Amino acid sequence: MSESLFIAELNTEAALRSLMVAALAGDGNAHHALLTRLAAKLRGFFGRRLGRDAADVEDLVQEVLIAVHTRRDTYDPARPFTSWVYAIAHYKLTDCFRRNSRRESVSLDDAAELFTADEAEQQSAQRDIAHILSALPEAQQQAIKLTRIDGMSTAEAAERCGQSESLIKVNVHRGMKRLMMLYAEAE
Amino acid sequence: MQTNDLIKQLSTQVTAVKPRSFMRRFLLAWLIGIAAALLLLVSTIGVRGDLSTAMLTVPFWIKWLYTISLMFVGSMLAMYFAQPENRSPRVLWWLVLPSTLLSMVAIFDLHQAPKESIHHMWMGHSALMCPWNILAVSLPVFVALMWMMRKLAPTELRLTGFAAGCLAGASGATVYALLCNESTTPFILAWYSLGMVLPGLLGAALGPKLLRW
């Protein structure tokens, strides 16, 4: 996650959390603002996982909002609000899959994803990177992805993909050069 | 209904809620369950005749210490799983701690005892009834807890069912100890533990059905 994205993430947490704390104290306006913001986030989250079945998506959004409302006394303000909401959204999603007896499993790793600053943009950026890299040989792709995108050190990357450290350096260098050449041609 | 209308409706009358106050609701349901279990025991078989003197003896308190410590662990676990983001099965290991301590006492007792009394120390005179009685006495607690847990926000329904079931078992065993006059530690270790695990297994089996929300 890039630094700006991380800070946006922290802001989301802080903003939503203070709305939630106010709502727990009985502030109806804060409650309204909280649910409205959550509805938008949840629509994106479920939409990406259920495809275009808009009715299903809206049903799930409403179910989660109702759960957030009626089960709000299970939230502990000492802990992150976003993971509390995410856990509920994830539960409702798996429950929906189970109901439709689809054999899909939902990964828990993407807890942060529900709250990324601009989801669509981020997704397409990742697709673009994957597309660009696919022009390179496998070893160069790997070396660049590990060191430049995942942010590993050369030593870590070497250990991860079994290339020697100097080979990693060479592959990164050659790969970057090749990419620049390709894109210079394309311009 | 439109989502915006729903949000408006949910926000019109927002009552103040104390954070984490689900614990109070949980404790209330639990106490009602225990009261019902007591009533069940007293109205059917009654308590042991020598209860007032028995309560002054060590075996009675070893029994209660064991079942009450499991009630403590069980209630912590049930409240842990009542929060949606809590899903780690590892916390269940806490249930093993009281049993481990009791088995050390039991091993010591068995070591001290003469050979011919060992069989009796394990089997007592009610070994085959004890676990079933505990299961029966714990059922009111089981019902009360399941009814409450589904109003909270558990997301691991099988684990939640197991934890709440074990808590019902430990509560039932604590009540049942008012009747049971077995006094040896190996007996308690074997048959009380079994009696407390049975509602736990029942909870794990029924959890995904009963606790869905």
Image (cartoon, coloured by chain):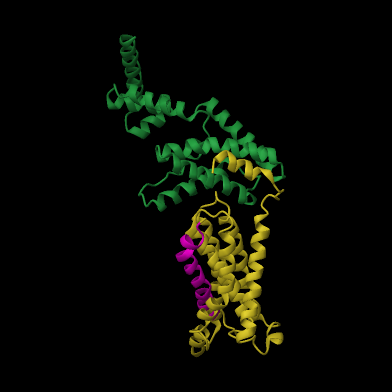
Chain colours: A green, B yellow
Q: Is residue B132 above or below residue B74?
A: below
**Image coords of residue A119 (percent x, y):** 48, 30
- Please say whether residue A154 is visible from this viewpoint: no
Name the chief secondary structure element in magenta. Answer: helix
- Give the magenta-colored segment's residue range: B187-212
**Image coords of residue B77 (percent x, y):** 57, 60
The residue at the far left in this view is A137
Please report the residue visible at 51 percent of the width from the left and 88 percent of the height from the top.
B120
Q: Could you tell me which quadrant the C terminus of chain A lies in?
A: top left
Please report the residue visible at 66 percent of the width from the left and 60 percent of the height from the top.
B25
Please report the residue visible at 32 percent of the width from the left and 33 percent of the height from the top.
A162
**Image coords of residue B202 (percent x, y):** 48, 69
Q: Residue B4 or B142: which is nearer the viewer?
A: B4
Q: Is residue A62 above or below residue B58?
A: above
Q: Is residue A177 above or below residue A70?
A: above
Please report the residue visible at 66 percent of the width from the left and 57 percent of the height from the top.
B23
Quadrant in which residue A146 is drawn: top left
**Image coords of residue A150 (percent x, y):** 43, 29
